[in-house]
Amino acid sequence: MPPKNGKSLLVIVPAFNEEGAVGSVIADVHRVMPDVPVLVVDDCSSDATVTVARGAGAQVLSLPHHLGLGGCVQAGYKLAFELGYQYVIRVDGDGQHDAADIPRIFERLRSSGCEMVIGSRFVNGTGEQTSMVRALGSRFFRVVLRPILGKAVHDPTSGFVGVNRIALGVFSRSFPLEYPEIETLVVLQRRRFRFEEVPCRMLPRKSGRSSITPMKSIYYIVHVLLGVFVNVLKYERRVPKQPGRS
Amino acid sequence: MDRLLNVMTGLSALLILLVLVSVRRARIRVEYSVSWLIAALALLILSRARGLLHSIADLIGVTYPPLALVLLTGCLFLVIFYRFSLIISQLKDDNIALAQRVAILEYHVQSLKNAG
């Protein structure tokens, strides 16, 4: 699957037991961007995710055992980087991300030159399809991240993310493994990379149900907070700030 | 005091035996058995060498020598647990990288098969 769409964009879909939704996710992406290849990264599903994905016309990268979201996404980034893609947009396999927003994320990635673009539910004060727990979590992390990032991020838990080749190279080598979305922002900040947000719609899940429980939410907050501060404290040779970069 | 020290002696001897049997059955690799054997041997010696235990108790300001032994045991095991946490973390990172590499290589093999 070498880059052949001229703009060298790849859409990756991390999926774990998403046989009920992944087919329509792929079909939606193909409908919106017919020339863009779709790579489903299957995190060792026990259902027919792989068969459904292949049947819908996607390429499939099958992990030999379950790695969790971060390991799954990173595998997709590694392959995209090896294949020479310039841009990668991640769309979740449960159908909550609206494929109609992909062109806007891609356009912003190309026109802004920033390393990452986040599809945000809250950038325009919307977010109507978000659960209360998730909205509260987002609000909490917005407050925590504001001083660390030096700018506001409206939807830090969004998994609807596009990256350019520079970020792709970095994430291929080092990527937060368990809950990657928020830690990724800190990794970017450490390297003085830029990110922007574009407004996106959040749809209801197409199948299955969320695995988020109150206990998991607490674990998530503690885990991510620790991950954020570890990344802040991590010793890495920092890239000097470039003129004109925020 | 004697009873507590005897219990510690028995536990240390049991730990040494358990580790040796596990090594013999190849359930623990030799390099990972060393930490346990050193710790168990140290406990065994301290629980039998009263003079040495009293000196250590005096040194760390503990009036009841068996308590010093329990404290030392705790510290030793903390060091061992920490060391194994480092090893497990490294192994997990290696395992993830390896699984990703296997998946990517399989992808390339499949692409070549499809092309040919």
Image (cartoon, coloured by chain):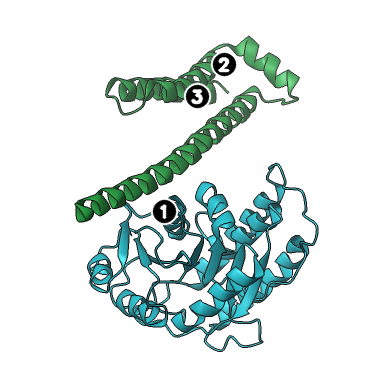
Chain colours: A cyan, B green
Q: Which residue: 54% across, 32% down?
A: B83
| Residue closer to the observer: B99 or B62 | B99
Q: In the image, is B107 to the left or to the right of A172?
A: left
> Residues under labels 1 and 3: Cα distance?
60 Å
Q: In the image, is B103 to the left or to the right of B42?
A: left
Q: Which residue: 49% across, 38% down?
A: B90
Say which mark, if any, is on residue B8: 3
Dot 1: chain letter:
A
> Residues under labels 2 and 1: Cα distance?
61 Å
Q: Which residue: 53% across, 26% down?
A: B4
Could you tell me how many numbered marks the image carries?
3
Dot 2: chain letter:
B
Disc 1 target residue = A83
Q: Secondary structure at mark 1?
A: loop
| Residue closer to the observer: A54 or A10 | A10
Disc 2 target residue = B46
Quadrant position of residue A165? bottom right
The residue carrying pointer 3 sits among few (fewer than 14), some (14 to 19) or many (20 or more) residues within 10 Å by Cα, namely: many
Three-letter amino acid code of the residue under disc 2? Leu
Q: Position of residue A75 (x, y in %)?
A: 42, 54
